Image (tube, helix red, strand yellow):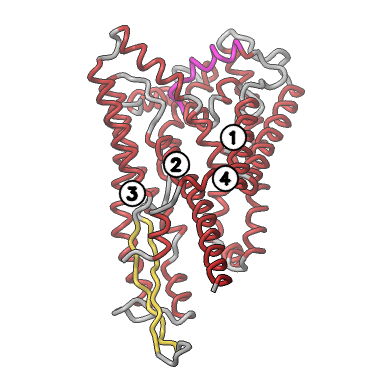
Amino acid sequence: MASRADNIASNLNLGNFAKATELKQRIWFTIGALIVFRFLSFVPLPGVNPLVLAELYDQTRGGILDLFNAFSGGSLERMSLIALGVMPYITSSIVVQMASALHPSLSALKKEGASGRQKLNQYTRYGAVLLCAIQGYFLAVGLESFAAQNGLQAVVDPGYMFRIVAVINLVGGTMFLLWLGEQITSRGIGNGISLIIMAGIVAQFPSFATNLFEGGRTGAISSLVIIGFLVMVVGLILLISFMERAQRRLTIQYPKRATQRGMMQAERSYLPLKINTAGVIPPIFASSLLLLPLTITQFAGNSVDTESGFYTVLQALNQYLAHGQPLYMTLYAIGIIFFCFFYTAVVFNPEETADNLKKNGGSIPGIRPGKRTADYLEYVLTRITVVGALYLTLVCVLPEYMIAQTGIPLFLGGTSLLIVVNVTVDTISQIQSHLLALQYGDLIKKAKLKGRMR
């Protein structure tokens, strides 16, 4: 049975949007911040030639850089000040989150509440700076060596001075993006970091759509293929929208308590378990590992002896792990399923949840508190994780199969589609929350007026 809040949310009057002055200010601030992000993606690093960079990047397509370039909105391709985007922060947050679940001292810090979370966030930022400095240095070195091997001079003045300047600028660019994301979260609408990633992905959609329909106009791509592609995208969006909000709600019952009228009443609530607890982490990890051999080969170039066994192994891996190959899609699916179970086990601890329920006097009807509750939570979580893993596998492997069969350069893969849909749904939910709060305020004012009239 729907609650009163659910009924009001379903009957939201969008006409109240004109009255929501604060909400409009937040939306305009968010749009302005994202425009700043897009402008920065076109500012190149000092000491590089953007025209040569475009030619070099065309020779490295298909590797792990494509994944990072999609998340940075093309900034890596242009080697801009924000070429690394927010990926170092995402990687650092994943590492800190896993460490807080496995390391005793960090786990205790996590339980301290707001102060503990603040310290963990600070560790995440330190890790992001460290990762950004390391990635920036190797990116500068790789850019120098790769350009020299291909007979192109992308760096105007190679050397240690260029590497130092590149690292400083890349670290500064990533830290500015983190600050911009925090400003969006506090003064705008939605999650700032997620919106920046989504803006980078969506920014590439116009060029992709233009190439797709141009191919249809010239006859390079069949009209049936274009229609099938559009149907697939719409179907995946609907599936993602449904599955990302799907939950298994476990009933939690608390002891009877006396009410104001002296009646004993038992309180009930629900423990929501998401079908996809791992989010978009499994596809990112799986694709990064599979694309690593190709990336090593591209940057190693002529420095690896073509007669060596290492070079032969890399070439064989690149041949069998190319996009659309059966081995690639099989290992991709297996990697997604593995990381889905692994990351879910890291972020959700059934024993800790069962202990918290026992301390607060809550229990699952028919299940004894303590170890039995932990076993039951683990049993339910394993079953719904199977569904979530199969769903993630379908969403991520189906676009890869589409690319292999049609040859369409599909930049909007499963991971990108997951991010775009999730962030959009979350942002819309926050807008609805603001409108709902405004509608509640109007109801309270009307109730006060009626009370005065009486």
Residue 118 falls within the magenta-colored stretch: no
Mark sitting earlier along the chain (1/3)? 1
Mark sitting earlier along the chain (3/4)? 4
Mark sitting earlier along the chain (2/3)? 3
Are the residues tagged 1 and 3 within 8 Å (C-beta)? no
From the image, which quarter does the C terminus lie in? bottom right
Residue 55 falls within the magenta-colored stretch: yes
Q: Is residue 13 left or right of residue 35?
A: left
The span picked out in magenta is 51-64
Question: How far apart in space, not on screen, are marks 3 and 4 (Cα)?
Answer: 23 Å
Are the residues tagged 3 and 4 within 8 Å (C-beta)? no
Residue drawn where x is 32% and y is 60% of the image: 382
The residue beneath circle 2 is 285
Q: Amino acid at mark 1?
A: Ile
Q: Which mark is residue 31?
A: 1
Q: Is residue 179 left or right of residue 87?
A: right
Q: Residue furthest right?
A: 161
The secondary element bearing badge 2 is classed as helix
Question: How far apart in space, not on screen, are marks 2 and 3 (Cα)?
Answer: 21 Å
